Image (spheres, rainbow, N blue to C red):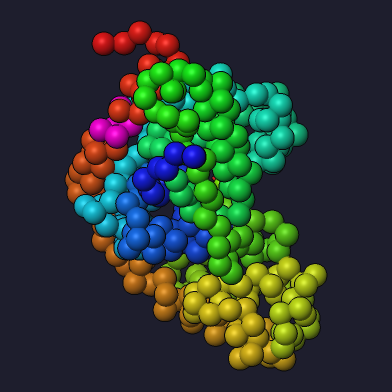
Amino acid sequence: MPPTFKPLVFSGVQPTGNLHLGNYLGAITKFVALQQKYDCIYCVVDMHAITVWQDPKELRNTTREVTAAFLACGIDPKKHIVFNQSQVAEHAELAWVFNCVARLGWLNRMTQFKEKAGKDRENASVGLYAYPNLMAADILVYRATHVPVGEDQKQHLELSRDIAQKFNNDFSESIREHGFGDAFFPLPDPLIQGPATRVMSLRDGTRKMSKSEPSDQSRVNLTDDADAIAQKIRKAKTDPEPLPSEEKGLESRPEADNLVGIYAALADVSKADVLKQFGNAQFSTFKPALADLLVAKLSPITAEMRRLKDDTAYIDSVLADGSARARAIASQTMKAVKDIVGFVHA
Ligand code: ATP
Ligand code: MG
């Protein structure tokens, strides 16, 4: 009989720059919806952020900004847990154990490292390489069972499952001896659903929209005002054909597919429904409708983010409270891990 674990949601967002529509549709809207059914832990993963250089002042700002975005989008920090990773040292502690469980061969297959390290791989930080082990620790230090993420994180989630499984196997005898039955860690399930699990750049329909992409024109930021949104959508790359009337017609038209997917996700309908309405329309008709929908959905969030962001004392108190509650869970897991691995402790 496989052991059952209490359902628990964990996910994180890096404070590496401006939050964008991809983060919102691929991750944060899912975080909000899951609060109804599950206990949730949402983390601003500042330790992941420093795997590439971050200016310290900027990092503090962005950490607060991502927290403000969580709250503005409707995450409830009282019913659930919102905190920043570096305040709970157990993430780093468990990550070390996982550094010794994961195999080099596994990490060598990670495409995010290859993309982010680029050509000058020798000069990438060790942290960027070991990032997926820390991500596994983020999830498993709470023994979380469900992880809402965008499509780009699927490979890292699979690695988290491999690490959990190898730990459970390597230490199976000790796990049983300490009363944890057949498995100490759950194999966390990725939740990757809906029409916008991979929002693409507005400049290039084959690249994902990212915070760390240098061109601001490539993304809609949650802090953009109505004029900036309208301008970015007007300039978004497209092809010269009108929109197709069926979804099949979006194949091999990545930019058109992306804009239709964004519309569908915002309106909470399918791509087929969007094409029922806009099939055969020119982009000169579709783009203003998309910009209007974006402004209608994002402007209340942007306004609330601005208001919250200036209240540093409040944001910091949310993070301190969330960290204390997160630490209470994580320290229990770490005690058990120490027993299982054979570390002497008080
Ligand atoms: P960076 O470029 O610094 O990696 P990012 O834009 O990829 O930033 P992350 O903080 O790494 O953002 O990811 C936060 C969450 O947003 C993750 O669940 C990730 O899968 C999701 N996400 C990121 N980009 C997209 C996107 N373009 N479409 C859908 N989901 C996305
Ligand atoms: Mg990313």
The residue nearer to you, when weighing 295 against 172, is: 172
Task: Give the side of residue 269 with respect to residue 111, left or right.
Answer: left
Q: Residue 35 placed where, x, y %? A: 34, 59
On screen, 329 above or below 194?
Answer: above
User: Which sits in the foreground, 130 or 136?
Assistant: 136
Q: Is residue 328 magenta?
A: yes
- Looking at the rendered structure, the number of numbered marks drawn on it comes to 0
344 sits left or right of 137 in the view: left
- Magenta part of the protein: which range? 327-331
**Residue 222 position by quadrant:** bottom left
For image coordinates 53% across by 73% down, the residue present is: 265
| Spot occupied by residue 79 in the image (x, y as percentages of width and height) | 24, 54
Q: Is residue 42 above or below residue 261?
A: above
Q: Position of residue 111 (x, y in %)?
A: 69, 41
Viewer can see residue 317: yes
Q: Quadrant of the C terminus?
A: top left
| In this picture, residue 249 sits left or right of residue 42 | right
Most extreme residue toward the front is: 1
Is residue 203 within the magenta segment?
A: no
Residue drawn at 48 percent across, 49 percent down:
147
Q: Main secondary structure of the magenta part?
A: helix
Q: Is residue 92 visible?
A: no
Q: Residue furthest top?
A: 344
Q: Quadrant of residue 243?
A: bottom right
Identify the residue shown where x is 42% and y is 79%: 296
Picture quadrant of residue 278: bottom right
Looking at the image, residue 206 sits to the left or right of residue 314; the answer is right
Q: Is residue 124 above or below residue 282?
A: above
Q: Which residue is at a point 60% across and 84% down the rendered structure image?
A: 274
Q: State the image coordinates of residue 27 (x, y, percent, origin top left).
A: 48, 57
